[in-house]
Image (cartoon, rainbow, N blue to C red):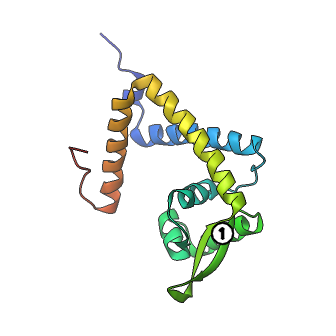
Amino acid sequence: MTEAPWYDIVAIPALLRHARNTYGSAMREALEAAGYGDIPKNGLYVVGGLALGEGDVPLSELIRSLRISKQSAGQLVDTLVLRGYLERSEDPQDRRRLVIGLTARGRAAAAVQTGARERIDAQLADAIGSAQVTSLRKSLAALIALDHEQDSPDDDA
């Protein structure tokens, strides 16, 4: 009788957590080496996410995407502002709202973070092949869609 591979026995949430740790550890090590070791927990998500976007993001959108309390999100933003990664300003379309954006230091840290992520992505593609990485992305997108009550990703994508 053939034993099932270890990854067939481990629950998917545990696999996701450990896979996330692979990326997080690589990013933290790269940031530390480059002098950006003071980014707090959840700060990687904020800095990296803002770097992918186009311009400033409303603070309310950030709070919603992090799924943390307004108070915790505010403290995180305050810390990132004080440490020079973010700047806060009024929304030009609605002065009652605040938007956040990356500073030059934040963009530099995001570039280091992106480089670490790309190294892990390349190692993963070497280990399982580009088609499998694409399949993994599609599977994760379907899982995310379940949470957001959206349709599954396109089968042709």
Residue 98 higher or lower than 35, as above or below: below
**Which residue is found at the position 68% from the left and 64% from the top?**
103
Q: Position of residue 17 (x, y in %)?
A: 50, 42
Q: Position of residue 93 (x, y in %)?
A: 50, 86
Q: Is residue 32 visible?
A: yes
Which residue type does callout 1 highlight?
A: Val
**Which residue is found at the position 27% from the left and 60% from the top?**
150
**Left or right of residue 129: residue 37:** right
Secondary structure at numbered mark 1: helix
**Left or right of residue 101: residue 82:** right
Query: Which residue is nearer to you in this view: 40 or 101?
Result: 101
Q: Is residue 41 visible?
A: no
**Left or right of residue 127: residue 100:** right
Query: Which residue is nearer to you in this view: 108 or 155?
Result: 108
Mark 1, other Cα within 10 Å: few <14 / some 14–19 / many ≥20: many
Q: How many numbered marks, from 0 up?
A: 1
Tell me the quadrant of the picture where the N terminus can be found. top left
Q: Position of residue 59 (x, y in %)?
A: 55, 74
What residue did someone put label 1 on? 77
| Residue 116 in which image quadrant | top right
| Residue 81 in which image quadrant | bottom right
**Which residue is found at the position 56% from the left and 41% from the top?**
117
Tell me the quadrant of the picture where the C terminus can be found. top left
Q: Position of residue 8 (x, y in %)?
A: 36, 28
| Residue 107 in which image quadrant | bottom right
**Which residue is found at the position 67% from the left and 66% from the top?**
86
